[in-house]
Image: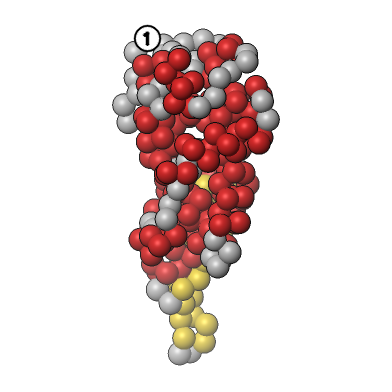
């Protein structure tokens, strides 16, 4: 645990919080799921705040996509790997860290634990160091994933499922037709609509609207 606290740049006053943050639900009923919930919200707030203050020229849609990339499973797993927490996570028999979000979820739990052990200002100081070097460069925004890809990643991480699309061709008048799409995530009880001159554009618009709903909800 000394390696973790050194890499975090934070020493816990209550070591029990650190131990709980490193405990997966497969190991004990006293696990890190609640801390993960808290940390997820705090990281979301931190990223939203930093994006808002750093990139005043970007509109809400681009900010939403930037945020989705930063808090994605892949990015949080990468940060967790750099913290070298894999060997310290307490897992139940038969559980492993391959092809899942346990690393990233544990990182979220650690951030939740730091908040309870200190305050939000300390959390921001910690995240400035940990997420700062993983923050997406605004110059790379043209290479961001499209809304459907970003939405799929967020939905898989949060709800362990995939979004669904219902898209239809609609005649506006005798000479004009458009496509209307409804994107749903049943597990979240959320949906959003989009329109476009073709099926792809309609679905991208619907995905962008739903992604915005989900990200803002957190």
| Residue 156 pos. (x, y %) | 44, 40
Residue ranking furthest to the bottom: 175
The quarter holding residue 40 reads: top right
Q: How many marks?
A: 1
Residue drawn at 34 percent across, 13 percent down:
94
Front residue of 178/103: it is: 103
Front residue of 111/106: it is: 111
- Please, is residue 43 above or below residue 204 in the view? above
- Please, is residue 199 above or below residue 50 in the view? below
**Coloring scheme used:** secondary structure
Residue drawn at 38 percent across, 60 percent down:
140
Front residue of 108/175: it is: 108
| Residue 103 pos. (x, y %) | 41, 27
Residue drawn at 49 percent across, 80 percent down:
171
Q: Residues within 10 Å of mark 1 (few under 14, many from 20)?
A: few
Q: Can I make out residue 143 in this image? A: yes
- Please, is residue 194 above or below residue 155 in the view? below
Q: Quadrant of the N terminus?
A: top left
**Which element carries disc 1, helix, strand or loop?**
loop
Front residue of 208/194: it is: 208
Q: Which residue is mark 1?
A: 93
Residue drawn at 39 percent across, 53 percent down:
149
Q: Can I make out residue 38 in this image? A: no
Q: Quadrant of the C terminus?
A: top right
Residue ranking furthest to the left: 98
| Residue 77 pos. (x, y %) | 39, 34
The quarter holding residue 92 reads: top left
Left or right relative to 129: residue 13:
right
| Residue 82 pos. (x, y %) | 37, 31
């Amino acid at each position: 645990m000394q390696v973790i606290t050194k890499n975090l740049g934070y020493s816990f006053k209550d070591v029990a919080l650190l131990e709980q943050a490193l405990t997966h639900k497969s190991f004990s009923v006293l696990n890190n799921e609640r801390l993960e919930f808290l940390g997820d919200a705090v990281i979301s707030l931190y990223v939203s705040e930093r994006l808002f203050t750093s990139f005043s020229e970007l509109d809400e849609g681009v900010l939403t996509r930037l945020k989705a990339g930063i808090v994605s499973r892949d990015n949080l797993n990468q940060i967790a790997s750099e913290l070298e927490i894999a060997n310290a996570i307490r897992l139940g028999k038969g559980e492993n860290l391959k092809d899942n979000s346990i690393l990233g979820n544990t990182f979220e739990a650690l951030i939740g634990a730091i908040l309870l052990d200190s305050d939000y200002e300390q959390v921001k100081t910690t995240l400035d160091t940990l997420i700062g070097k993983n923050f997406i460069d605004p110059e790379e925004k043209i290479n961001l994933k499209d809304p459907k890809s970003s939405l799929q990643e967020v939905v898989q991480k949060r709800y362990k499922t995939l979004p669904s699309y219902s898209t239809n061709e609609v005649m506006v008048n005798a000479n004009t037709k458009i496509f209307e799409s409804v994107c749903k995530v049943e597990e979240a009880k959320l949906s959003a609509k989009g329109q476009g001159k073709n099926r792809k554009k309609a679905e991208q618009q619907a995905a962008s609207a739903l992604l915005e709903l989900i990200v803002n909800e957190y």
